[in-house]
Amino acid sequence: MKVESWLFLLTGAFFIPVATVYGFMTHWTEPVGFLGMYLLSGLCIMVGVYLYYTGNRVGPRPEDRLDAEVHEGSGEQGHFSPWSWWPLVLALSCAAGFLGLAVGWWIFMVGLGLAAIALVGWVYEYSRGDHAH
């Protein structure tokens, strides 16, 4: 993860002076541009720091080594829920929340409540019922 972490860190460092120059060129009157670039820089730096610490903790992956073989990257890559309906419920509740921002706050509150239920259901899906571990 060394390459990915440095890519994000350098991108974050690049956008700090770009946002500052942009702010001076617009006389700091257009807040969306420079503020968005400062936030983009912060997000890039956060992702880069996370990848840097994760790469130090986990060690080099087969993708990071020049002498790695293709078969070293095979095997289980993660745990996925192929029969889960909770992502669909969460997506629909988020769509209702965004609709509520445009139409009415009561729809937003309904979407927020459904999103909380869907998120809890998705997180605890394998803690109860037929698929409990």
Image: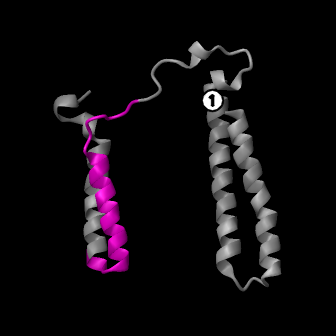
Q: Any magenta on residue 60? A: no
Q: Position of residue 112 (x, y in %)?
A: 31, 65
Which sits in the foreground, 49 or 108? 108
Q: Is residue 111 above or below residue 102?
A: above
How many numbered callouts? 1
Q: Residue at x 47, y 26 (%)?
A: 77
Q: Which residues are magenta?
A: 79-106
Whether residue 83 is situated above or below residue 118 in the rendered picture: above
Across and down, in percent, residue 129 comes to 16, 34
Answer with left or right where residue 13 lies relative to residue 48: right
Q: Quadrant of residue 2?
A: top right
Q: Crowdedness of circle 1 by 10 Å Cα count: few (<14), some, many (20+)?
A: few
Q: Pick the quarter of the image with the N terminus.
A: top right
Let me know if residue 14 appears in the view.
yes
Residue 115 visible? The answer is no
Residue 29 picture location, percent across and down: 72, 86
Q: Which residue is mark 1?
A: 57
- Residue shown at the point (33%, 56%) measured from the top left: 91
- Per the image, label 1 sits on a secondary structure element best described as helix
- The amino acid on which the numbered mark 1 sits, given as a three-letter code, is Arg
Q: Nearer the viewer, residue 12 or 70?
A: 70
Image quadrant assignment for residue 123: top left
83 shown above or below 37:
above
Q: Is residue 104 magenta?
A: yes
Question: Residue at coordinates 72% horizontally, 36% vertically from top-left?
Answer: 3
Classify the position of the C terminus by image quarter: top left
